[in-house]
Image (cartoon, rainbow, N blue to C red):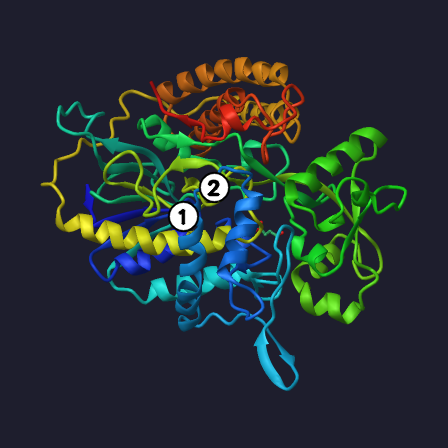
């Protein structure tokens, strides 16, 4: 058994920011499934929304966030994230991160991008690879810390709680079991401050902009530990994922539309004007539904994002990563429109927390995409999530440090028991179930829902969960099996939450209840086991 003052699971912006702050007060372990940079953060293109310009104000950023959130944001959380943002951004800059600047009338100022739903230009960015720069900056700083251990290729299996061990005392989180992929052994990590920063669950859908690690591990583990989970019906579909047979999960940033890109259908029409006066830069839920409708109506496979009216030098300089990637697939975006489709992008719900990342289980924190703080409500405003990750990580570190001084005596934890289990004999079963979940979620629990489709998905998922449970208890745990088990749990949570909400609001749109019903449903959907 290994002992740490703080154990962080996940190495994106939230996890690493927390770890750097906590390291000033004790030993920290950062547990991550693949390498440190295999995170959603590293894939973030657009940037960080933050008020830095004289033409902008905190009030406007709060107003835009609340409008996108469709009545479900927690205003106090939104205000704190927005107003604390600039200070947290300064800290990133002190670590060496340089956001893009531009020259205006002989002086340099931040080059601010624009995305859907923002009334002002306020998105700080580093070209079109902001997340990668942030990730590299934070990892470089982490490697300088003597009391932080980074465990790569380690997958969290389950949380260890007082209740699971049968203690009659107040329930709390005591540690976590972790699979070391190299040895195949499950290690016991003891810490009275466990932080879930595992990101989202895009891989639960057939098409996603997320990397392979996004399998909903944090939400699934918290759910199994009896922690409250909120608003899982609100899955954000990004309108523009590259449509190409060989391109897997490649996002075409909303910043392309922010710089004037226009969505066109297969006939070349600027169709978005028919759906919303804001056209191609309307909020994401509206754009994604409009594309879905165009595709279904016409039978076309995709729509097109056209920025060919901008100078090629501008496109190459502002979007080098997207430009080069499209070129690799044989498309020059300065000369031809990019084929795009919507894809699952962001989980707006998650483990229910307060502004300090505290969950309903003492000793367990959740930060970043895995958490539902109330910042995003029913629909996240673009580029607000990196900001939320930074600010809430700071708050959570301060809270966890404080609580540590009042921590209870440490309890000896049982080692993982693998019993007589054997290696998985038929990997095909895992892959088949994995594919089935992702396809049924796409077909039945996607951008437009109905009760009938949700009920079908629910019935099928219960069967799959039974099969997976059998597998889990009879065979040695592997990363694939753990991820499948987590995906199934999160898929069921999305379906159950969607079935609870008999209205349409934000990202949850159902043909059976196409209007919002404030009287009954202007509230969070909160589920907990039992
Ligand atoms: C994008 O670049 O379009 C993604 C930004 C975000 O999802 O916040």
Percent x, y of residue 455: 57, 14
| Secondary structure beneath label 1 | helix
**Crowd around label 2: few <14 · some 14–19 · many ≥20 (10 Å):** many
Q: Disc 2 versus disc 1: distance between alpha carbons?
A: 8 Å
Please name the residue that numbered disc 1 is placed on: 77
Quarter of the image holding residue 362? top left
> Which of 236/327 is in front?
236
Kindly identify which residue carries mark 2.
Answer: 73
Q: Are marks 2 and 1 in contact (CB under 8 Å)?
A: yes
| Camera-nearest residue between 249 and 402 | 402
The answer to whether the residue bearing label 1 lies less than 8 angstroms from the nearest atom of ligand 1 is: no
Residue at 44% over, 71% down: 93
Indicate the quadrant containing the C terminus: top left, top right, bottom left or bottom right: top left
Question: Quick one: 424 or 513, which is closer to the camera?
Answer: 513
Q: Is residue 462 above or below residue 264?
A: above
Report the residue at 47% width, 70% height from top: 97
In the image, residue 204 sits, relative to residue 404, either above or below, namely above
x 35%, y 22%: residue: 529
Q: Quadrant of residue 100?
A: bottom right
């Amino acid at each position: 058994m290994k002992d740490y003052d703080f154990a962080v699971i996940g190495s994106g912006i939230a996890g690493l920011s927390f770890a750097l702050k906590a390291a000033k007060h004790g030993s920290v372990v950062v547990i991550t499934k693949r390498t440190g940079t295999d995170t959603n953060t590293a894939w973030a293109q657009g940037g960080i929304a933050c008020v830095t310009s004289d033409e902008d104000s905190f009030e406007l950023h709060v107003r835009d966030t609340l409008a996108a959130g469709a009545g479900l944001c927690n205003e106090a959380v939104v205000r704190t994230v927005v107003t604390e943002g600039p200070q947290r951004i300064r800290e990133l800059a002190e670590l060496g991160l340089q956001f893009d600047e531009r020259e205006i009338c002989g002086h340099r100022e931040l080059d601010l991008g624009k995305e859907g739903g923002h009334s002002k230009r306020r998105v700080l960015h580093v070209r079109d690879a902001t997340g990668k720069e942030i990730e590299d900056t934070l990892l470089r700083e982490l490697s300088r810390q003597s009391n932080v251990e980074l465990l790569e290729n380690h997958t969290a299996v389950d949380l260890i709680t007082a209740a699971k061990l049968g203690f009659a005392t107040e329930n709390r989180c005591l540690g976590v079991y972790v699979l070391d992929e190299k040895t195949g052994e499950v290690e016991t990590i003891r810490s009275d401050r466990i932080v879930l920063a595992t990101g989202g669950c895009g891989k639960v859908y057939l098409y996603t902009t997320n990397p392979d690690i996004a399998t909903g591990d944090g939400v699934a583990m918290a759910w199994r530990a009896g922690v409250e989970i909120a608003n899982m019906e609100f899955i954000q579909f990004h309108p523009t994922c590259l449509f190409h047979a060989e391109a897997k999960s490649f996002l075409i940033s909303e910043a392309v539309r922010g710089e004037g890109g226009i969505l066109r259908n297969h006939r070349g029409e600027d169709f978005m004007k028919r759906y919303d006066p804001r056209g191609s830069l309307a909020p994401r839920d509206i754009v994604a539904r409009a594309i879905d409708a165009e595709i279904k109506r016409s039978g076309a496979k995709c729509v097109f994002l056209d920025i060919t009216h901008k100078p090629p030098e501008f496109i190459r300089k502002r979007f080098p990563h997207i430009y080069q990637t499209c070129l690799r697939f044989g498309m020059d975006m300065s000369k031809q429109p990019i084929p795009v489709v919507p894809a699952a992008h962001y989980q707006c719900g998650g483990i229910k927390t307060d502004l300090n990342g505290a969950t309903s289980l003492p000793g367990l924190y959740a930060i970043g995409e895995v958490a539902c703080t109330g910042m995003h409500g029913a629909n996240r405003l673009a580029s607000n999530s990196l900001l939320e990750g930074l600010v809430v990580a700071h708050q959570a570190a301060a809270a966890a440090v404080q609580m540590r001084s009042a921590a209870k005596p440490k309890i000896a934890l049982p080692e993982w028991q693998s019993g007589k289990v054997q290696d998985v004999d038929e990997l095909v079963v895992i892959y088949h179930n994995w594919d089935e979940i992702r396809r049924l979620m796409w077909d039945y629990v996607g951008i437009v829902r109905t009760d009938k489709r949700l009920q079908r998905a629910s019935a099928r998922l219960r069967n799959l969960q039974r099969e997976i449970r059998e597998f889990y208890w009879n065979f040695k745990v592997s990363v694939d099996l753990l991820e499948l088990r987590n995906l199934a749990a999160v898929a069921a949570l999305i379906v159950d939450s969607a079935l609870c909400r008999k209205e349409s609001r934000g990202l949850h749109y159902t043909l059976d209840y196409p209007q919002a019903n404030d009287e009954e449903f202007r509230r969070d959907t909160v589920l907990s086991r039992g």
